[in-house]
């Protein structure tokens, strides 16, 4: 079972690399090195802040765009190319296919984030000339970004399991935007009373909470991240991804592929 | 059981369990991240920067920032906080994004001006906010009224209060009471009388249940101030005549100094302490009282104003 998932994951990773997904690293490197050199000349005392904010935001946004645009095609592309039939004609379960695709995409994004993280720390070293202890919190922010990737990957797969690539991209991106404001949404829900309030509260708890996974601003200001937040965020991201993956499995399991 | 059925049931069970667990975890996260959103948004404290970053959708951003300001004030107020450091920046950003959001000036000034824990105790910031509102909405008489209110109630600057009411009275369609308020202010009317006039105007000129409820509570407190002042004068008179303090208000009725035992705004009779002070029976039911509460009395958190004002 695990071997089959591993094969599918590895092939998904290889396919992403063949699709030149990792080329985005060049754009990222240019962006960050440009910012590191320029900001020192046009501003005062915020070089480090800009490099951390810009670097981590770029890691997150590049990854999310990749997750959405690869994730939405993971199932539909296999159907269009008819390669899915070849895979499923072998002793591979449909749920294994979904899980394998998820790990393959997540792996691609983790590798991508790893190289970008090296870029962020290199730019940081360039502007600050040395690392300080609070810079370690950047790793936590990067870890949270990876947790965001897991949620987005699972959502993209969920939408990909029943919708067209274009609509899947719209759904996934909309959920990302809504999820980034989910704390506000729950704040609004707390102000509304009665059945509407319960409805808004329900929606607010159903959409993914990306705001809790975004500590970029506080990390840029060298503020520590509590161990409890790390633990709860990890649990939340894993649970939410599991929910979306189960949804994808349920839909894909019943889908008529003829 | 077929393979497909087994997978479907397992996936359904895992989905429901994980969803329930994720909601539980999210609630925990909300607890440990109280106020985190506000701290995050205020890292970007420049109103012009926020305006530029809103990409033209500044109306929506203003609504979001206004809601954040309300949530911030509401949560701190309920906790009887003594400091509201993020309130002024939030209101500044809100009104910079949408200078015509009059509600932000009106409520915002009422959040900023009163002394803690009823407000942020920042009347200067409230004046600045309302003046910015007047600058952008010069035909809105309520903003002049709010300005005069702050000058009178929280800054005790009667000349500026009179000036604000006077300016407001000249705005087209201004409430006629503004002229009376300006005149009363110019005549240096008694403080309680003036306060009563202001709160009565507030009550009469708004449809908002929270504001009406707040006005009712202040008017009740002013009634208690008047009653206690009068009753303590009668107690002093009784002491002068009999050489001793009355044991209860019934003694004053028996001595024909009162027609009947007076009741406070909640319908309960006033009482006399052994030191001759007049107090209300349950001060917790009459917020904002300045007289008639035991020495060292600490008021409870505010009650549901909306219910009271409806």
Image: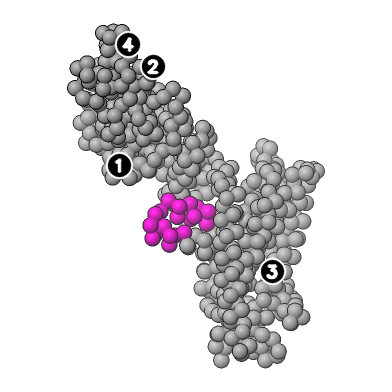
In reply to whether residue A194 is colored magenta, the answer given is yes
The quarter of the picture where the C terminus of chain B appears is top left
Closer to the eye: label 3 or 2 = 2
Instruction: Work out whether mark 2 precedes mark 4 in sequence or the reverse, and give the earlier one.
Output: 4
Please tell me the numbered disc located at residue B188. none
Tell me the subunit letter for badge 3: A
Magenta segment range?
A: A181-201
Are labels 4 and 1 on one chain?
yes
Cα–Cα gap, marks 3 and 1:
55 Å
Give the quadrant of residue A46: top right
Determine the chain carrying the residue at label 2: B
Decide if residue B208 is in sight here: no
| Nearer the camera: disc 4 or disc 3 | 4
Disc 3 to disc 2, C-alpha distance: 77 Å
Secondary element at tag 2: loop
Callout 4–callout 1 Cβ contact below 8 Å? no
For marks 4 and 3, give the CA distance: 87 Å
Residue B244 relative to residue B61: left or right: left
Residue in front for this viewpoint, B173 or A253: A253
Q: How many marks?
A: 4
User: Any mark on residue A106, and which?
Assistant: 3
Front of the two marks 2 and 4: 4
Q: Position of residue A75 (x, y in %)?
A: 61, 79
Residue tagged by mark 1? B309
User: Disc 2 marks which residue?
Assistant: B275
The residue tagged 4 is B244
Name the subunit of mark 4: B
Answer with mark 2 or mark 1, whichever residue precedes in sequence.
2
> Of residues B281 and B42, which is closer to you in this image?
B281
């Amino acid at each position: 079972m695990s071997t089959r998932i591993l094969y599918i994951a590895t092939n998904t990773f290889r396919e992403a690399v063949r699709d030149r997904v990792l080329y985005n690293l060049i754009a990222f490197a240019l962006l960050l090195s440009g910012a590191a050199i320029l900001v020192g000349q046009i501003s005062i005392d915020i070089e480090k802040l800009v490099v951390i904010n810009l670097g981590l935001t770029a890691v997150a946004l590049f990854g999310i765009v990749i997750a959405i645009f690869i994730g939405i095609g993971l199932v539909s592309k296999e159907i269009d190319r008819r390669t899915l039939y070849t895979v499923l004609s072998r002793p591979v379960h449909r749920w294994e296919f979904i899980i394998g695709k998820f790990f393959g995409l997540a792996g691609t994004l983790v590798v991508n984030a790893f190289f970008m993280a090296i870029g962020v720390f290199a730019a940081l070293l360039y502007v600050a000339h040395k690392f300080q202890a609070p810079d370690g919190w950047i790793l936590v922010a990067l870890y949270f970004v990876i947790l965001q990737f897991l949620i987005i990957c699972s959502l993209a797969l969920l939408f990909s399991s029943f919708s067209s690539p274009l609509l899947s991209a719209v759904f996934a991106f909309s959920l990302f935007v809504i999820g980034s404001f989910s704390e506000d949404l729950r704040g609004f829900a707390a102000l509304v009373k009665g059945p509407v309030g319960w409805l808004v509260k329900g929606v607010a708890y159903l959409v993914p909470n990306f705001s809790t996974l975004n500590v970029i601003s506080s990390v840029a200001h060298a503020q520590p991240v509590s161990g409890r937040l790390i633990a709860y965020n990890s649990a939340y991201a894993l649970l939410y991804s599991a929910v979306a993956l189960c949804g994808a499995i349920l839909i894909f399991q019943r889908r008529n592929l003829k | 059981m077929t393979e497909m059925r087994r997978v479907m049931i397992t996936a359904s069970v895992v989905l429901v369990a994980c969803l329930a667990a994720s909601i539980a975890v999210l609630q925990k996260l909300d607890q440990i991240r109280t106020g985190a959103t506000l701290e995050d948004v205020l890292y970007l404290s420049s109103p012009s920067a926020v305006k530029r970053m809103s990409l033209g959708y500044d109306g929506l951003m203003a609504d979001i920032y206004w809601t954040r300001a309300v949530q911030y004030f509401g949560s701190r107020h309920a906790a009887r906080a003594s400091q509201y450091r993020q309130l002024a920046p939030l209101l500044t950003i809100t009104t910079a994004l949408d200078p015509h959001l009059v509600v932000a000036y009106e409520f915002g000034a009422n959040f900023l001006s009163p002394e803690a824990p009823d407000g942020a105790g920042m009347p200067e910031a409230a004046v600045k906010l309302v003046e910015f509102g007047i600058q952008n909405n010069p035909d809105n008489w309520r903003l002049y009224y709010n300005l005069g209110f702050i000058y009178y109630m929280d800054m005790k600057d009667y000349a500026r209060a009179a000036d604000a009411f006077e300016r407001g009275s000249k705005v087209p369609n201004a409430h006629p009471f503004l002229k009376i308020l300006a005149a009363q202010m110019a005549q240096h009317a008694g403080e309680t009388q003036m306060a009563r006039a202001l709160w009565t105007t507030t009550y009469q000129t708004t449809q908002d249940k929270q504001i009406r409820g707040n006005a009712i509570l202040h008017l009740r407190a002013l009634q208690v101030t008047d009653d206690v002042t009068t009753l303590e004068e009668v107690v002093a008179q009784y002491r002068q005549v009999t050489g001793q303090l009355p044991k209860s208000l019934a003694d004053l009725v028996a001595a024909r100094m009162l027609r009947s035992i007076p009741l406070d705004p909640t319908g309960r009779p006033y009482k006399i302490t052994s030191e001759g002070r007049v107090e209300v029976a349950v001060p917790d039911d009459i917020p904002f009282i300045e007289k008639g509460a035991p020495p060292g009395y600490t008021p409870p958190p505010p009650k549901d104003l909306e219910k009271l004002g409806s």
